[in-house]
Amino acid sequence: MEEVIKRNPDGPQLVGDIPQLTVPSEEMFQELLSSYLNTSFEWERITEKDVKISSQIEPAAYLKFAREVLDKKSQLTEKEAIALSDFLEKGSESSLRKVIEEIHVLLRDVLTTPSPPSQKEFHVRLANFLEKQTAIYDAVLKANDDPMRAVLAVNEFPGTSQELESLREYMKL
């Protein structure tokens, strides 16, 4: 990508009425594009330092809280689908922004509620799941600013469904 930027310091040039970039070769451009698409979606990860741990918390009480968070997140699934549809088909951001805010509320609850030491790893996984969800939707909202990041984000949707199921399976243990 750097090579393309170096060759086009002023951005695309008009050739007739069509904006075009000077690229070293089509082969090199395809290689650069392919390497970018093989990049994984990144978001700010939550670590053990970001969550609260307390030996005063009973594991059963924590698991009840975590189950409620997962239930609330599952109830958002239909809203998420409608919000994405509204955004993609109508350009309406309001529903998607509301979904992001609802997930942020769940995340804030997870980050402010301590877990017992025995549930620390699960607690971090749960927080990261919610953080990733908001990062994905945020990237979709900003698709015009960074279309490649939006593509990478959309590719994460199947994995988030699997992660939700994995978290739910853990709760059954």
Image: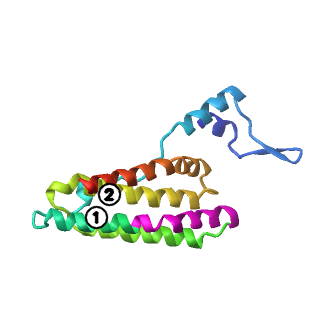
Q: Secondary structure at mark 1?
A: helix
Marks 1/2 in contact by CB < 8 Å: the verdict is yes
Q: Which residue is mark 1?
A: 66
**If the image is split into quadrants, where does the N terminus sit?**
top right
Q: Residue at x 31, y 52 (%)?
A: 169
| Pick the front one: 63 or 156 | 63
Q: Residue at x 50, y 56 (%)?
A: 136
**Residue 86 painted magenta:** yes
The quadrant in which residue 74 appears is bottom left
Q: Is residue 23 left or right of residue 14?
A: left
Q: Residues within 10 Å of mark 1 (few under 14, many from 20)?
A: many
Q: Can residue 15 be seen in this snapshot? A: yes
Q: Position of residue 2 (x, y in %)?
A: 59, 37
Instruction: Inspect the image, locate mark 2, and give the three-letter code of the amino acid beneath it.
Output: Leu
Q: Earlier in the sequence, mark 1 or mark 2?
A: 1
Vertical order, 91 against 167 (above or below): below
Q: Position of residue 21 (x, y in %)?
A: 74, 40
Q: Which residue is mark 2?
A: 126
CA distance separating discs 1 and 2: 8 Å
Foreground tag (1 vs 2): 1
Q: Is residue 48 left or right of residue 40?
A: left
Q: Can residue 107 be seen in this snapshot? A: no
Q: Secondary structure at mark 2?
A: helix
Magenta part of the protein: which range?
A: 73-90
**Residue 43 painted magenta:** no
Q: Residues within 10 Å of mark 2 (few under 14, many from 20)?
A: many
Q: How many marks?
A: 2
Q: Main secondary structure of the magenta part?
A: helix
Q: Residue furthest left?
A: 56
Instruction: Inspect the image, locate mark 1, and give the three-letter code of the amino acid beneath it.
Output: Ala
Vertical order, 77 against 4 (above or below): below
The quadrant in which residue 6 appears is top right
